[in-house]
Image (cartoon, rainbow, N blue to C red):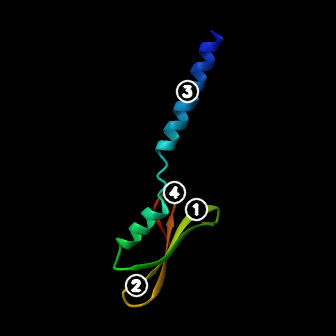
């Protein structure tokens, strides 16, 4: 009976862990870069992932069609643009 209880608890923990992982969006640096490229006719000059205020942020540096340099910051967990 103890083995069954242990296996049941272990199984429940593993299922709960897998279910929690299903809700994490998490986008890659490549996905964030493609997201930025889709928002305009930009040329990517560089991209990196950095920590800002304890969160991972993808920073994409682009050259705009009018010759300006612009930085896009994308939250790595949600994919949302940051101000």
Pointers 4 and 1 in contact (CB under 8 A)? yes
From the viewer's perspective, tell me whether residue 6 is left or right of residue 63: right
Residue, disc 2: 64
Along the polypeptide, which appears first: circle 3 or circle 2?
Answer: 3
Picture layout, residue 57 above or below residue 4: below
| Residue extending furthest toward the bottom | 67
Taking the spot 43% from the left edge, 68% from the top edge, the residue there is: 33
How far apart in space, not on screen, are marks 2 and 4 (Cα)?
26 Å
**Comes first in the chain, label 4 or label 3:** 3
| Residue at the disc numbered 1 | 56
* In this picture, residue 38 sits left or right of residue 60: left
Q: Are marks 3 and 2 in contact (CB under 8 Å)?
A: no
Label annotation for residue 77: 4
Q: Residues within 10 Å of mark 3 (few under 14, many from 20)?
A: few
Find residue 50 and report its horizontal and vertical position in percent.
60, 67
Label 1, label 3: how many angstroms apart (C-alpha)?
30 Å
Residue 12 bears which disc, if any? 3
Q: Label 2 to label 1, Cα distance in Å? A: 25 Å
Q: Above or below — where is 32 with respect to 60?
A: above
| Quadrant position of residue 35 | bottom left
Which type of secondary structure does the marked residue at label 2 adopt?
loop
């Amino acid at each position: 009976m103890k083995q069954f209880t242990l296996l049941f608890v272990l199984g429940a923990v593993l299922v709960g862990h897998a279910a929690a992982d299903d809700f994490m969006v998490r986008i890659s640096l490549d996905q964030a870069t493609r997201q930025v490229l889709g928002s305009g006719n930009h040329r990517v000059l560089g991209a990196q992932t950095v920590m800002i205020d304890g969160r991972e942020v993808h920073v994409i540096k682009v050259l705009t069609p009018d010759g300006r340099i612009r930085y896009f910051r994308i939250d790595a967990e949600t994919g949302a643009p940051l101000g």
